[in-house]
Amino acid sequence: MSTSSRKSIRKAVIPAAGLGTRLRPLTSITPKEMLPLARKPAVQYIVEELHGAGIEDIIFVVSPLKPRIQEYFGESTCDGQVRVHYVVQETQKGLADSILQAEQAVDGEDFVVALGDSVIVSKEQVSPLERLLEAYVGNPAFAAITVEHVPIEHSPRYGMVKPAEPVRGSSFRIDALIEKPKIEDAPSNYAIAGRYVFGPSIFDFIRRTAPGALGELQITDSIRLGMENGGLVWCAPLVGNERRYDIGNFATFCEAFAAMCMLDEELAPLIHRVIDCYGDRS
């Protein structure tokens, strides 16, 4: 598809069917995406991010064991801002399979994928998601990925990308990506940061993706397959003081909760008070 023929991207998929096993027992009663970060559940921040970037339709991929998301957002509109839809993923088979469940709802359009357990904080005039959409629409890409700069020693925790040329400007093309490489094999210090834009061709590549560990389908493998078949991928990095907060385990959830409280004028003094009280204890 030529860049000039692309229309505005109005649909987004939020994969939210994972069982959150690393956050049990909390996730025994509520999905991790519904855990509170300051005054709102985590996924509410993501919905607001998507709406701010022009998204009009959000497709939640949910587990039949996790009805809280449907109960919170309702069946048609979210605060009158966006239309919400739900697709049930009966069996957990990895992120790529979760995205595949939304194929019918996406209906042949380009679309965003925003992971339901990753919150991005930005004070930039143009948001990270808006920059990602610009990178996708403005280049002959079949996929675009938000990335963040991480210490190279942390690369085994992430999917890492290899820039095709020196990084300049607000986006760059990549020629490889590796899922959780060894430190010595990391192609750069840019890690995948939980936001993607895809064309509908990604669904064919997911169907052709071989299962990895535990029989799961990894979206990095699907993207790599697309690249091997001539597809181009652009990345848009987080800049300045922009931060991504993951809530996948107790340590990162605690960090995210504290960070979101610190951004609240009324709650921030309470966090400082706790730090003053306990910060000097061993």
Image (cartoon, rainbow, N blue to C red):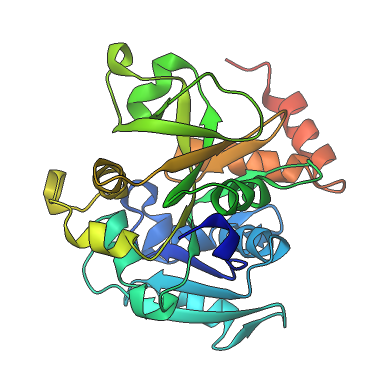
Give coordinates of residue 40: x percent, y percent. Answer: 67, 61
Which of 77 and 228 lies nearest the eye of the viewer? Answer: 228
Q: Quadrant of residue 79?
A: bottom right
With respect to residue 80, does 109 lie above or below? above
Q: Note whether residue 147 is visible.
A: yes
| Left or right of 214 in this view: 159 | right
Give coordinates of residue 171: x percent, y percent. Answer: 59, 35
Give coordinates of residue 277: x percent, y percent. Answer: 74, 27
Q: Residue furthest top?
A: 184
Q: Name the quarter where the N terminus is drawn.
A: bottom left
Which of 232 and 25 lies nearest the eye of the viewer? Answer: 232
**Looking at the image, which residue is at 59% across and 59% down?**
4
Q: Residue furthest bottom?
A: 76
Q: Name the quarter where the C terminus is drawn.
A: top right
- Total marks placed: 0
Which of 56 and 246 lies nearest the eye of the viewer? Answer: 56
With respect to residue 245, does 74 lie above or below? below
Q: Quadrant of residue 248?
A: top left
Which of 109 and 194 lies nearest the eye of the viewer? Answer: 109
**Looking at the image, which residue is at 25% across and 63% down?**
204
Give coordinates of residue 137: x percent, y percent. Answer: 58, 54
| Left or right of 88 in this view: 236 | right
**Looking at the image, which residue is at 48% across and 47% down?**
144
| Left or right of 99 in this view: 57 | right
Q: Note whether residue 249 is visible.
A: no
